[in-house]
Image (cartoon, rainbow, N blue to C red):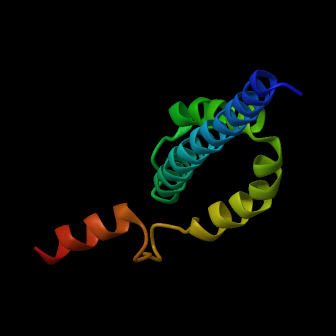
Amino acid sequence: MSSNNVRRHQTAEQEVDNRAERRTARAATLIAIRDRLAVTIVERESHDLDANDLYGDLAELESAIKVIAPQLYADRWVAWVEQDTELAHDSGSPRAACTLCTLLQSHRSA
């Protein structure tokens, strides 16, 4: 193989690696946004507030993650369900991890 062909081959491999890294970074960003949105939905529902306007956004994020990184999506799915279920609570039993509970508690203390 000539030196030009070797360079082209190495460049193509680097480009594939760069694309994979960008895809992984994009998926990680979407996962972080998805996780925060899911927490917001659970918190709203736990305090009898409407969260219906956010479900479409959550579905879009999860679909995008599934397209960009299907294995990562599959690996995360069970953890998401468990995490979202664990965060759910009723407004009568406050949770320290719940932003709304914390805000309500600080308002009551003031």
Q: Residue furthest right?
A: 1
Q: 10 or 102, which lies in front?
A: 10
Q: Is residue 48 above or below residue 10?
A: below
Quadrant of the frame with the N terminus: top right
Q: Quadrant of residue 77?
A: bottom right
Q: 85 or 70, which lies in front?
A: 70
Residue appearing at x 83%, y 25% in the figure: 2
Number of marks present in the image shown: 0
Q: Is residue 3 above or below residue 100?
A: above
Q: Is residue 35 above or below residue 66?
A: below
* x and y percentages locating residue 103 in the rendered image: 26, 64
Residue appearing at x 56%, y 52% in the figure: 35
* x and y percentages locating residue 78 in the rendered image: 79, 61
Residue appearing at x 65%, y 44% in the figure: 24
Position of 28 with respect to 15 (left or right) is: left
* x and y percentages locating residue 66 in the rendered image: 76, 37
Q: Residue furthest left?
A: 110
Position of 25 with respect to 92 (left or right) is: right
Quadrant of the frame with the C terminus: bottom left
Q: Quadrant of residue 7?
A: top right
Q: 21 or 11, which lies in front?
A: 11
Residue appearing at x 67%, y 64% in the figure: 85
* x and y percentages locating residue 8 in the rendered image: 75, 24
Q: Is residue 69 above or below residue 38?
A: above
Position of 75 with respect to 28 (left or right) is: right
